[in-house]
Image (tube, rainbow, N blue to C red):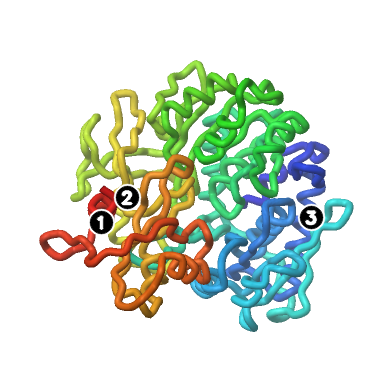
Amino acid sequence: MIFDLLDNGSPSRVAVAVSVRGPAVTYGQLRQQVQDLADDLRSLGLGRGDRIAMALPNGLELIASFFAASVVGTAAPLNPAYRVDEFRFCLEDTGARALILPPGGAEEARTAAGESVLVIEASLDDEGHVHLSSAKTVGPRRPDESPEPADTALVLHTSGTTSRPKRVPLSHSNLMISARNVAATYELTEDDVSLCVMPLFHVHGLVASTLATLFTGGTVVVSPRFNPLTFWGTVTDHGVSWYSAVPTIHQVLLARSKSRPAGAEHLRFIRSCSASLAPQTMAGMEERFGVPVLEAYGMTEAAHQMASNPLPPRVRKPGSVGSGTSVEIAILTEAGELLPVGTVGEVSIKGPNVFGGYEGNAEANAASFSNGWFRTGDQGYLDGDGYLTLVGRIKELINRGGEKISPREIDEVLLTHPSVAEAVCFGVEDRVYGEEVAAAVVLSGPATEAELKAHCSASLSDFKCPKTIYFVEAIPRTATGKIQRRNVAAEITK
């Protein structure tokens, strides 16, 4: 089980340190804390098979709670910025029995929990100890049970284009194998210090920055949030040897640095994942920061990493996401046949890190698996060296700086407005985020763009809300009457 990762580091070595005057805990201390927190959860009536959600900011409270929840039952981390409706959907869809929150605040999450979900508060004392408390229980104390490798350790939601978000269950084995693959790709050792600037409710920050580092007994430095003003100071203070982030963060750091920043000399490499990295950005980073930049490819269903460019002296190919990292990659036709080198098709994967299927969604599983291959929904091709280049997405997700957004979810919110007859959301190019959310709307009554944006904001996180709304007489359709979002975007924004 993933709790065993805490045996991989020397008991006296720092496992997790929170940047900007935060606490630091050793492997021995973190292991004991997780055991104590697991005992607290069992005392509240939680046990094997129970889904334990959490909506916490990046920090020691989230890491310790995640490990404890995965020991007792299944961890279900959520974005703390969600609105009530988003929290309610996630809690109901996962069947969460408990929700771990910061002391006080988090009113939208508390409202969503209502009386049916046990609210537990996670607090941090001056000595760096995490404590869990609740005014209620869900039943008598549950027995101590250790999870099996095939048990679900983590459940996350991934956005779909034709339905509500889908549940992705990841086993202890999936996560351990993925952490090992990441560690092997970048030759991580106990001397490495990673800086986690990605949210820990995503597999990018959780698996790549955190679990892979703990797998090799290194140190994870966690930032409560990305702050370009303190970033390089944190790198210097903690001797950070690598960090992983989305291109948006890399671009911000590059734009703010006119020369090599103090602290960059500590870095061994920089990793980029979760969205496409422009070759010119990669070149600018390598020139400015003086370290290799390695673009990788990951997704929730694969417990994160599937491919990566390698460390020097092996070749890094700008514009490519590298070769498979202990994961088989193939390019398939729509019928599931293998395509030759250099031919564009659907990127498909196999490997023990890949999940076994979406929960309670036979239709999605039938469409996503073909002869043992998981079909990613991305289009790409392999070159003669086995390097993968992505050229587009078959699935019409909007990728805003690494946040994968379901346009259907936004459509449904817009359509609840009494003056909206039709709504189609799509992604448009954006210099900072790669893609930004836009919408085409047919009105049946009076409404302004500001009014519709406010309507979306009441139900959706800010990053999902359309930044531009186009009012049109009719939504463009194909000859057969179908709506294709890419066609809508091309027609309306031309």
x then y, percent, for residue 356:
42, 56
- Pointer 3 with pointer 2, Cβ within 8 A: no
Residue 488 numbered tag: 1
At horizontal 42% and vertical 32% (from top left) the residue drawn is: 278
Q: CA distance from mark 1 to mark 3?
A: 52 Å
Residue 33 numbered tag: 3
Nearest to the eye among marks 3 and 2: give it.
Answer: 2
Front position in the image: 11 or 448: 448
At horizontal 67% and vertical 45% (from top left) the residue drawn is: 5
At horizontal 20% and vertical 49% (from top left) the residue drawn is: 334
Q: Is residue 428 above or below residue 330?
A: below
- Pointer 2 with pointer 1, Cβ within 8 A: no
| Residue for badge 2 | 377
Q: Tell me where residue 193 sits by quadrant.
A: top right
Q: For numbered disc 3, what is the local secondary structure? A: helix
| Amino acid type, mark 1 | Val
Q: Residue furthest right?
A: 126
Q: Residue furthest bottom?
A: 115
Closer to the chain start, of discs 1 and 3, is: 3
Query: Could you tell me if residue 217 is visible in this image?
Result: no
| Amino acid type, mark 2 | Gly
Closer to the chain start, of discs 3 and 2, is: 3
Q: For numbered disc 1, what is the local secondary structure? A: helix
Q: Residue furthest top?
A: 313
Q: CA distance from mark 2 to mark 1?
A: 20 Å
At horizontal 69% and vertical 56% (from top left) the residue drawn is: 62
x then y, percent, for residue 319:
38, 30
Could you classify mark 3 by the number of other residues whose Cα lies within 10 Å: few (under 14), some (14-19), or many (20 or more)? many
